[in-house]
């Protein structure tokens, strides 16, 4: 079956602009995670959804970052007033349930470049 | 808070050499441990995981890892690497009892020379 998909694969924007990054999880997966991977680093947790609600957004770096999952499937990560330091690969993952034994399946990521 | 350190950033091996990638974590309680792999141009994928039981865990493609609680370590091993093992490897940890808020290490790039 289809895996996790993310669009766009690449996004170049100018400092101060607004961007939206989309994640389509595996069908039927209730848990969805966003991570950010900066150059030379491992993925860093941003936010976790169980169904439609953000169960933990403690990893969002500041209030310029916001994510939604209105129908419990597709999720959008929104970044306002982008800064050069936001440049990174944004990864999405989903798992069948939120249980800690369930495997997370990752998407290909969106490479965001802020000029 | 939990943290993970991977000792080697870049490892170069010849085919058939043995591999051991170090991973140490920092967390006072019970943990779940993972190794993820990212092959060139591909998604991050799970290689193996440890939750409980036998501390020697076997994963895909001949990889294994040993959880040594006293050393807070979860090193990845493979007796004989192949060129196709060229990839970046990430060790990760999360505390059980809830969802998977996974903390990743910085990764080790493995290059296998034919």
Image (cartoon, rainbow, N blue to C red):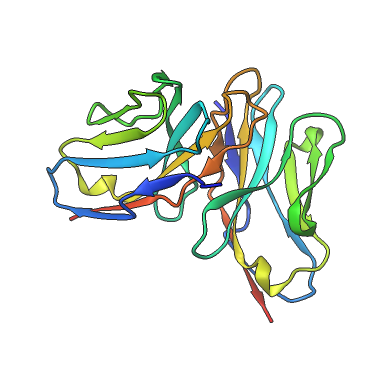
Along the viewing direction, whichever of A3 and A15 lies nearer the viewer: A3
Q: Is residue A7 visible?
A: yes
Quadrant (top left/top right/bottom left/bottom right) for the N terminus of chain B:
top right
Which residue occupies the foreground of this view, A93 or B10?
A93
Image height check: is B29 above or below B48? above
Q: Position of residue A7 (x, y in %)?
A: 33, 48
**A57 to B55, vertically: above or below:** above
Q: Viewer-proximal residue, B101 or B74?
A: B101
Point out residue A42 in the picture as x, y percentages from the top left corner.
Answer: 50, 47
Confirm whether residue B110 shows in the render.
Answer: no
Foreground residue, B35 or A75? Answer: A75
Q: Residue at x 25, y 35 (%)?
A: A78
Q: Is residue B101 left or right of residue A86?
A: right
Q: Position of residue A87 (x, y in %)?
A: 29, 50
Q: Residue furthest bottom?
A: B114
Farthest residue, direction front:
A1
Q: Establish if A58 lies above or below A78.
A: above
Q: Quadrant of residue B12?
A: bottom right
Question: What is the x, y in percent for residue A102?
Answer: 64, 31
Q: How many numbered discs sit on the rendered protein?
A: 0
Please report the residue visible at 51 percent of the width from the left and 44 percent of the height from the top.
Answer: A106
- Quadrant location of residue A61? top left
- Quarter of the picture containing the C terminus of chain B is bottom right
Q: Is residue B80 left or right of residue A49?
A: right
Left or right, A21 with respect to B106, comes to left
- Give me the residue at 67% from left, 23% from top: B28
């Amino acid at each position: 079956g289809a895996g996790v998909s993310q669009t766009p694969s690449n996004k170049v924007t100018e400092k101060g602009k607004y961007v939206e990054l989309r994640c389509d999880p595996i069908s039927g997966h209730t848990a969805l995670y966003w991570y950010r991977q900066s150059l030379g680093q491992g993925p860093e947790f941003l936010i976790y959804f169980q169904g439609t609600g953000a169960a933990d957004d403690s990893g969002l770096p500041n209030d310029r970052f916001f994510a939604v999952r209105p129908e419990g499937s597709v999720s959008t990560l929104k970044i306002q007033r982008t800064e050069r330091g936001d440049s990174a690969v944004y990864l999405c993952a989903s798992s069948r349930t939120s249980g800690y034994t369930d495997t997370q399946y990752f998407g290909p990521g969106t490479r965001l470049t802020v000029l | 808070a939990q943290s993970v350190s991977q000792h080697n950033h870049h490892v170069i091996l010849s085919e058939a050499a043995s591999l051991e990638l170090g991973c140490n974590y920092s967390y006072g309680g019970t943990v779940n441990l993972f190794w993820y792999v990212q092959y060139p141009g591909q998604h991050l994928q799970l290689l193996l995981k440890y939750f409980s039981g036998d501390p020697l865990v076997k994963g895909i493609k001949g990889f294994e890892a040993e959880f040594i609680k006293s050393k807070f370590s979860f090193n990845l091993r493979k007796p004989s690497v192949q060129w196709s093992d060229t990839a970046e490897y990430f060790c990760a940890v999360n505390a059980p009892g809830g969802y998977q808020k996974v903390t990743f290490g910085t990764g080790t790039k493995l290059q296998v020379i034919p």
